[in-house]
Image: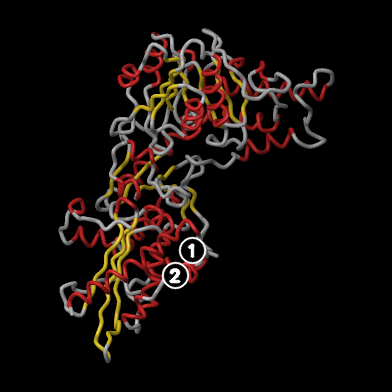
Amino acid sequence: MSTQSTIYLDYASTTPVDPRVASKMMEFLTPDGEFGNPASRSHRFGWKADEAVEEARSHVSGLVNCDPREIVWTSGATEADNLAIKGVARFYKSKGNHIITSKIEHKAVLDPCRQLEREGFEVTYLDPNEKGVITPEVIKSAIQENTILVSIMHINNELGTVNDIEKIGNITRDNGILFHVDAAQSTGKINIDLKNLNVDLMSFSAHKTYGPKGIGALYVRRKPRVRLEALIHGGGHERGMRSGTLATHQIVGMGEAFRIANIEMESDCEKVSEYHEQFLKKVQEIDHVYINGDLKNKVPNILNVSFNFVEGESLIMGLKDIAVSSGSACTSASLEPSYVLRALGRKDELAHSSIRFSFGRFTNDDDVNNTLEILSNVVHRLRELSPLWEMHLDGIDLDTVEWKLH
Amino acid sequence: MAYSKKVVEKFENTINNPEAFKVGRFDPKELNVGTGMVGAPACGDVMKLQIKCEPKGNTHIIKDVKFKTYGCGSAIASSSELVEMLIGKTLEEAKAIKNIEIVEALELPPIKIHCSVLAEDSIKQAIEDYESKQ
């Protein structure tokens, strides 16, 4: 075992629960706490739990400026995405059967779309531009007479690029089409003002914003009213949209995490921006480094970098004391490079060599400095080991080589 | 990660001590050097293996080996493992090496077996190149 402590730079994957959130959650579990079922209407235990759930609901709605009654608790952003997409499609199927989404969505959006295709819906998967942005123009041109739903993410989880949901919402509203936004990466990082956006459904996750895993929410607009078919039946909780006993402690955790995010968003972002600048400057001192995404239009907590001539998974293994994500899915069953980077038109080998660094509330100077030092060292060592680097130094253009496929 | 301790150790030892683990290159034009290069950057791995041989009796023996690998951790570990197996072997013995020996030595997970196949291909190609020069 290594004695070195592990540096965590994978906040876009998940965040630790803020200790303030955890201690609040503890008040809703044990016999001396408020453990009641929020649906129990006949006694104090239920009333107290219900109060806590509603307070949490108002914290969530407060962060994104909507009515608390527009928030539906789910088990996470994946369920919220499923509920929004399948729920809307199935409810409005008599109106049309066409859905628009993009190739760089999270699997929690892509897989429900694939499922709807099996059910007879038609789905258009839009290409991003080379910066990783889905422009309002491409959405406009994809709209058909039978389009009922557009689902586009706010911030891309691999690149940190930001889509213009204000402009997209204006287009969908003008065309009488519902607009769903996956905002799992947005809360606490970027301001969301649902009262002034033409967004009809929005998915949220607690664990990307220092709350617990296993809880999320779906915003469902009341005016104009959005209807959907429930996925889970059994008691009619959450106004029939999502049955099941509410997980009070999880909900309280999400509420507290979003309440804190509302207060600390600015200072969190300021700190993370400084680390981002520092990191970017140093990483660009390494030769043949490419920044994926759009530096002018992205959140500072995510930085996606390709190190040419080095394969991503080996880089991650070399960075063993640093927790980051690889754009390459080589560690999973698919052996495919990131579909997001591929959709940007990045060459496969650059997609294979990408690493996502993501910073957060508990990142410190040592984390950043130590990572930069280890990173440049490991990239150097792996290049010394790389036949591609050797060929590059010999002046061979790798694109002209005829590779012997295996 | 599903990697065995052996893969991790092999990978780390190789990148931390490249010379001892035969990372490097021979001049491919030399007559006693055979070069094999397999894989493609787009697939995520490229292995380059070079053997330096000398005649012994009516066969040739591998005196030294150099390699470079671009690829995932198990691709690097697999080439390094193969290189260790090769030194001192006759070409016939080297040709007989099967990828399963690397799989077993490193306890490769099923999804990474192609790394060992790549390693086996690289030695076959290197020997072919060497023999074509004799």
Chain of the residue under the numbered disc 2 shown in the image: B
Horizontal side, residue B54 vs residue B95: left or right: left
Amino acid tagged 1: Leu
Where's the C terminus of chain B, which quadrant? bottom left
* Marks 1/2: CA–CA distance: 8 Å
For disc 2, the marked residue is B102
Image vertical order of residue B95 relative to residue A330, above or below: below
Horizontal side, residue A403 vs residue A115: left or right: left
**Number of the label disc, if any, that sits on residue A13:** none
SS at circle 2: helix
Residue A40 placement: quadrant: top right
* x and y, in percent, of residue B3 in the image: 50, 60
Badge 2: few (under 14), some or many (20 or more) residues near its Cα, within 10 Å? many
Instruction: Name the foreground residue: A72 vs A115.
Output: A115
Horizontal side, residue A104 vs residue A257: left or right: left
SS at circle 1: loop
Image vertical order of residue A232 relative to residue A307, above or below: above
Q: Are marks 1 and 2 in contact (CB under 8 Å)?
A: yes
Q: Residue at x 39, y 33 (%)?
A: A104
